[in-house]
Image (cartoon, grey):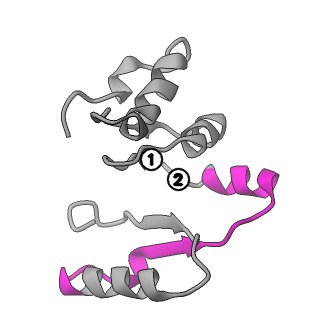
Amino acid sequence: LRLVPDSVLWLMEMLPYPGPEESLRAMLAAEDVDPQRLLVTQMLPFKTHLLQKRQADLFIDSLSYNAHSTAVELLWSGVPVVTVPGRKMTARVGASVLLASSGALPAALVARTP
């Protein structure tokens, strides 16, 4: 976030309590990053959810547990997804989704190293 001044970390609220969000904001502040650059959005009806995803410029997949349906939804919304396949099945799903969609997407979106 420090290297890309207008970027944000955008997460979907998944837990019914605020602990993780508060911890992430504290971590950002400790790194001299404005905690307001963390956006946490609530679950929305599916069509609205897809429309909201269109606001993103890029999705960077997590390493240990790749995006599953999230990757598909982002692609449907026209958002590029970048992923790195890991060793376990849960860390290879993002690459599988992108490679299965390779007719419409550049294979370069699947990185070989983190």
Relative to 34, is 2 on the left or the right? left
Q: Which residue is mark 1?
A: 59
Cα separation, mark 2 vs mark 1, equals 7 Å
Please say if the residues under marks 2 and 1 sit with CB atoms less than 8 Å apart: yes
Kind of residue sitting beneath label 2:
Ala
Establish if 48 lies above or below 17: above
**Pointer 2: residues within 10 angstroms few (<14), some, or many (20+)?**
some
Rendered location of residue 33, percent (x, y): 26, 79
Residue 98: give x, y in percent of width and height: 48, 26
Type of the residue with mark 1: Phe
Residue under the image location 39 percent in, 46 percent down:
61
Residue at position x 21%, y 61% in the image: 3
Q: Residue at x 42, y 40 (%)?
A: 90
Q: Nearer the viewer, mark 2 or mark 1?
A: 1
Q: Where residue 56 is drawn, which disc sits there? A: 2
Q: Is residue 17 left or right of residue 86?
A: right
**Would you place residue 13 above or below residue 45 in this image?**
below
Q: Residue at x 27, y 33 (%)?
A: 87
Magenta part of the chain: 30-53
- Does 3 sit above or below residue 91? below
Percent position of residue 19, x then y? 45, 87
Q: Secondary structure at mark 2?
A: loop
Query: Looking at this rendering, what residue extends furthest in the top direction?
Result: 103
Q: Is residue 50 magenta?
A: yes
Q: Depth check: 21 or 81 in front?
A: 21
Q: Position of residue 54 (x, y in %)?
A: 62, 49
Q: Quadrant of residue 77?
A: top right
Callout 1 crowding tier (Cα within 10 Å): few <14, some 14–19, many ≥20: some
Q: In the rendered view, does 19 fall on the left or right side of 45?
A: left
